[in-house]
Amino acid sequence: MLALAALAVRLLPFRTLTKTLGWGGAGHGNSSEPPASLPAQVAQAVWRASRRSPWRTVCIHRGIAVQWMLRRRGLDGRFHYGLSQADSVLSAHVWVSLGGTILIGEEEASRYRCVAEFPPGGATQPLDGQGTST
């Protein structure tokens, strides 16, 4: 999934890519309840693969891979896209959460204001307390 995510970021327009982040939403996939440890295991697997990857991976690659893997398993993961500006330099960061817990991308998420959440529909709360946005 990490390789597919990197390829998708390179080849697809962002608008098209974000449409894929809601595929296979909660309620799809296995009819049995997944183990509570599954989300953390998915994030850990992606993080390990990222460290061993022969190419450079960044937060958007890891976030897309985790989001796709969660959604395939019927879990309602949320892909967050945040922006930050310091010294006139705009930077972006991606993180994925499930039930309010950040699974991947947490190390930098607090520095960014969430400007979009995928799939859309839930209220997006920036982690820095600067109000809400969608």
Image (tube, rainbow, N blue to C red):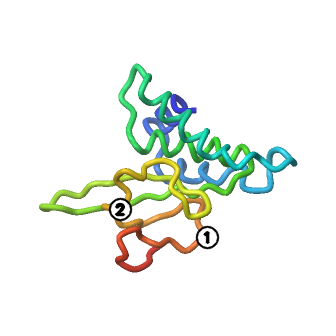
Q: Kindly indicate the quadrant of the structure image that contains residue 1.
A: top right
**For the point 43% across and 44% down, which residue is it?**
60
Q: Is residue 8 left or right of residue 26?
A: left
**For the point 55% across and 41% down, which residue is it?**
43
Q: Nearer the viewer, residue 39 or 126?
A: 39
Q: Secondary structure at mark 2?
A: loop
Give the farthest residue toward the left. 87
Could you say where residue 79 lies in the image, as x and y percent from the top left?
53, 55
- Looking at the rendered structure, the number of numbered marks drawn on it comes to 2
Q: Which mark is residue 121?
A: 1
Q: Which mark is residue 51?
A: none
Mark 2 is surrounded, within 10 Å at the Cα level, by few (under 14), some (14 to 19) or many (20 or more) other residues, namely some
Indicate the amino acid at tag 2: Ser
Mark in front: 2 vs 1 = 2
Could you say where residue 25 lies in the image, as x and y percent from the top left?
72, 54
Mark 2, residue position: 110
**For the point 37% across and 53% down, which residue is it?**
93
Q: CA distance from mark 2 to mark 1?
A: 22 Å
